Each structure stands twice: as C-alpha cells, then as structure tokens.
Amino acid sequence: MIRLVEPTTRIAVDVTFLRMERPPARRGPALPAGLEVERLFPRCSVPHYRQLYAAVGHDYVWWLRRTLSDGELESILDDRAISISVLRNAEGELGFYELDRRAWPVINLAYFGLMGRGIGLGVGMPFLHHAIAAAWSEGCTAMTVNTCTADHPRALPNYIKAGFRKLRTVREEWPVPDRLGLPIPDRLRI
C-alpha cells in the first residue's frame, strides 16, 4: 500500500500548561452591557463548531480540530462531558469557550478565544471569568488550560491574572497541513 504524505509546514511553539486549584477569591469583572453568553444545548452542531473554531483560531494556527472528519468531530461534540458556550452581542457572535469534563473532577478549558471583531472591546477578561465561574459552579476540584506562543500575546498573562498558575512549559513541533491555508508567522516556522 502506498501512503501519501500530506504537505505540511513545521512550526515550533512553546506550550504552557496552567492549573487553578481553587475558585478565585474575588468575583471577576462582569460582562459589559449588551453581551450575553449562551451554552449551546444539547450540543453545538459540527458546522457551527467549525465556523467558531475557524473564526477564533485562524490567526493563531488552531489547526488540530480542522483536520478531524465530521464524524470524529461529532463524536467529541456528542460527548456530554463537552460543552460549548458562545459570547454574543446584538451584531452576532464574538467568541467561544469549550469546557472538557472528561478528566472529572478536573475541568479543562480546552478552547477559549475571541473573534477578530471581539478583540479590543474589553470583553476578553470578563468572558474568561465567565468560563472560570461556569466550571467552578459545577463542583470541580481544579481547572486546567494551556496556551502556546502561537496564541494571542495576551493569552498567557490573562490566564495568570485570572488565577491560573504555570505548571510547565514545553517546546512542541507541529506539522500544520498546508491545505488548511492558515497564516503561519515566520517566528514559528522551523
């Protein structure tokens, strides 16, 4: 059997793993007026998830979920341990977060981010605190999240400011499929 190798661009990123052992002592900033967060229930559809993932992650080399088949992605979204919540204003969606409870009683903030039109509006930290409060309201014993040097430069400082602490940082090399058409910053290319 001949196996075709897909063309990729290799990148190197520093991935920082973070953990929060207890809920924040103070309540985080409230969402500004006119914004709401909706948990998509009973689940997010595959096309809607693909749209959210692409809109938030396009400029930050979010590639892994884009390589999954519809069936593989549907299997993840059908898992009751996974939930997707969307930030909206009157004009539409501004971002989303994904909580993953498969390692219960630890909840992982698997994905978190804003679309381009949501950046710079002062909603990132209130939205992050919404995700944190949602997880802790379920009775988890800890929260985890990771971020990398391909993400928005404020991601890591904001996670730390919100109460996460760094566990470790590791260098990873990723083969990003060229067919995805993602913009890859020169600083990440190997």
Image (cartoon, helix red, strand yellow):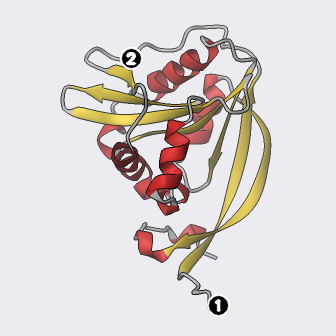
Q: Residue at x 74, y 22 (%)?
A: 105
- Which amino acid, by three-letter code, is at mark 2? Leu
**What residue would you read off at disc 1?**
1
- Which amino acid, by three-letter code, is at mark 1? Met
**What residue would you read off at disc 2?**
31
In the foreground, 71 or 158 = 71
Q: Residue at x 56, y 56 (%)?
A: 150
For the N terminus, which image quadrant? bottom right
Question: How far from the left and from the top, in percent, is residue 63?
Answer: 51, 60
Q: Residues within 10 Å of mark 2 (few under 14, many from 20)?
A: some
Residue occupying the far left of the picture:
91
Question: How far from the left and from the top, in percent, is residue 164?
Answer: 69, 28
- Disc 2 from disc 1: Cα separation: 55 Å
Write down the quadrant of residue 110 in the picture. Answer: top right
106 with respect to 55 (left or right): right
Residue occupying the far right of the picture:
168
Q: Dot 2 lies on which element? A: loop
12 with respect to 43 (left or right): right
Residue occupying the far bottom of the picture:
2
For the C terminus, which image quadrant? bottom right
Query: Which label number is shown at residue 75?
Result: none
Image: 147 above or below 18: below
Question: How far from the left and from the top, in percent, is residue 114?
Answer: 40, 39
